[in-house]
Amino acid sequence: MTLEDLFSAGSQASTNPPKPLEIVFAMAVSILLNLAIATLYRKTYKGTRYSQDYVQTLIIIGVVTTILIMVVSGNGAIAFGMFAAFSVIRFRRNLGQSRDLAFVFFAMAIGMVVGARRYDMAVIITAIVGTAIYILSKSDAFAPRRASHLLTLRMTSEMNFEELLKPVFDEFTDRTQLVSVSSVQAGMMTELRYGLQLKLGASTPKLLDALHQVTGNNRVVLTPTGQELDM
């Protein structure tokens, strides 16, 4: 069996080629559903690299997919030619978040379903998946319980850092993880790096003040990472 036979395998079960009015109707449905997907993306976006170009591209991808599915319906030769042409396309844009790729697949999937002339199914899928995405976004599901921090500080080499830092960590943190210990300034100082999970309501200025007192006003850097500690 050739590749053309594979593309044409479902042609016997396919309906008649779509009429011009049905193509226009399908494109209108695809535009409306992909506009809903684009609006959902905009409403639920939480990053700092929002792109109008990307959102408009989502709509275009969905509509173009609908057109392609309708064109290749029952025509194995055209399907094979399009498959060969699209196999050499390379996308040059780096997606900012993993969910951006998911929305691309979402738009393409709806475009395919509409192109297959399953309009009721396309509406239902858009409604169910869109509602799930909205609820997950607004409820902040699977987010870290609290933002973690990376602590970098220096103490003189003769200081017992474990004994000195323990009371501070007990007061301000739920969990700590020693990441690295290194000797700096010709062995006169010890540089420590910790992963911290701050207690709910812990005051960052008070934590820094306590750390400065313990370290003798040496270098202290506290950096939010926005990630849960793996402990």
Image: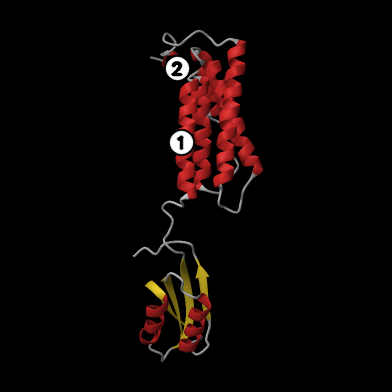
* In the rendered image, the vertical position of residue 161 relative to residue 177, given as above or below: below
Is residue 157 left or right of 20 when viewed as pictured?
left
Frontmost residue, 189 versus 198: 198
Indicate which disc, 2 or 1, sits on the residue closer to the N terminus: 2
Q: Is residue 8 visible?
A: yes
Q: CA distance from mark 2 to mark 1?
A: 29 Å
Q: Which mark is residue 129?
A: 1
Q: Which is closer to the viewer, label 2 or label 1? A: 1
Label 2: element kind: helix
The quadrant where residue 33 appears: top right
Residue type pointed to by label 2: Phe
Residue type pointed to by label 1: Val
Residue drawn at x 35%, y 86% as measured from the top left? 163
Q: Is residue 180 visible?
A: no
* In the rendered image, the vertical position of residue 177 relative to residue 112, given as above or below: below
Q: Position of residue 125 (x, y in %)?
A: 46, 30
In the picture of the structure, the residue carrying the numbered disc 2 is 7
* In the rendered image, the vertical position of residue 50 relative to residue 114, given as above or below: below
Label 1: element kind: helix
Residue drawn at x 38%, y 14% as measured from the top left? 1
The number of numbered discs placed on residues in the rendered structure image is 2
Q: Position of residue 214 (x, y in %)?
A: 45, 88
Frontmost residue, 122 versus 185: 122
Residue drawn at x 55%, y 31% as measured from the top left? 88
